């Protein structure tokens, strides 16, 4: 009988500590959570990454340089070529406007042609390259800190 009470006490203590930890985690998430509502005219575009000359970038949520989830948009002028590269985390991309041509691997062969509304997702370290023939906007949703490593 005493053994049952010891086991029951241990189970209760474990459950209590898990619920306290979960409550603290929930509090943290709620504190950092905020409502974001952006009309297209509210989006603030800045110069994009140096590796992609002429592009513009807008961070809609979070910070690509810091740990945690972020959402950004990348505006690619007509003729932009994104060389073969990899990222350190899962990449999720939605085509907002234009046509995005995407090839897996280090060569621009057998591209998938993604019009507005198209979507792709790659695990970390997937070699891929892309290009656009017309101005195209894509939305990237992933976790920071975000890295872009060119593959030669």
Image: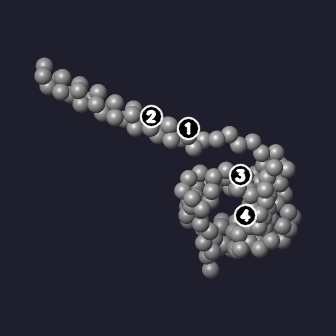
The residue that mark 3 highlights is 60
Mark 2–mark 3 CB contact (< 8 Å): no
Cα–Cα gap, marks 3 and 4: 23 Å
Quarter that holds the N terminus: top left
Residue 84 lies, with reference to residue 25, above or below; the image says: below
What is the C-alpha distance between the residues marked 1 and 4?
A: 37 Å
Question: Residue under circle 1?
Answer: 30
Mark 2 or mark 1: whose residue is earlier in sequence: 2
x then y, percent, for residue 33: 60, 41
- Quarter of the picture containing the C terminus is bottom right
Above-or-below relation of 30 to 132:
above
Q: Earlier in the sequence, mark 2 or mark 4?
A: 2
Label 4 Cα neighbours within 10 Å, binned few <14 / some 14-19 / many ≥20: many
Relative to 92, does residue 81 appear above or below in the rendering?
A: below
What is the x, y in percent for residue 24? 44, 38
User: Furthest-bottom residue in view?
Assistant: 152
Q: Which residue is mark 2?
A: 23
Residue 46: quadrant of the picture: bottom right
* Contact flag, marks 1 and 4 (Cβ < 8 Å): no
Q: Is residue 97 left or right of residue 93?
A: right
Whole-angstrom CA distance, mark 2 to mark 1, is 10 Å
- The location of residue 40, given as percent across then percent down, is 83, 49
Horizontally, residue 152 falls left or right of residue 73, namely left
For mark 4, what is the residue? 102
The percent coordinates of residue 132 (x first, y second) are 81, 66
Residue depicted at x 75% and y 61%: 57
């Amino acid at each position: 009988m005493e053994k049952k009470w010891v086991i029951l006490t241990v189970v209760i203590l474990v459950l209590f500590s898990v619920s306290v930890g979960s409550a603290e985690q929930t509090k943290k998430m709620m504190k950092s959570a905020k409502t974001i509502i952006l009309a297209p005219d509210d989006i603030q575009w800045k110069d994009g990454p140096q590796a992609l000359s002429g592009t513009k970038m807008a961070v809609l949520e979070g910070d690509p340089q810091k740990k945690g989830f972020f959402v950004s948009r990348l505006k690619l002028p007509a003729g932009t070529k994104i060389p073969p590269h990899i990222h350190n985390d899962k990449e999720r991309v939605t085509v907002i406007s234009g046509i995005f041509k995407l090839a897996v691997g280090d060569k621009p062969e057998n591209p998938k042609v993604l019009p507005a509304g198209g979507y792709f997702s790659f695990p970390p370290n997937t070699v891929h390259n892309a290009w656009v023939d017309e101005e195209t906007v894509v939305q990237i949703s992933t976790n920071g800190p975000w890295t872009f490593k060119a593959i030669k």
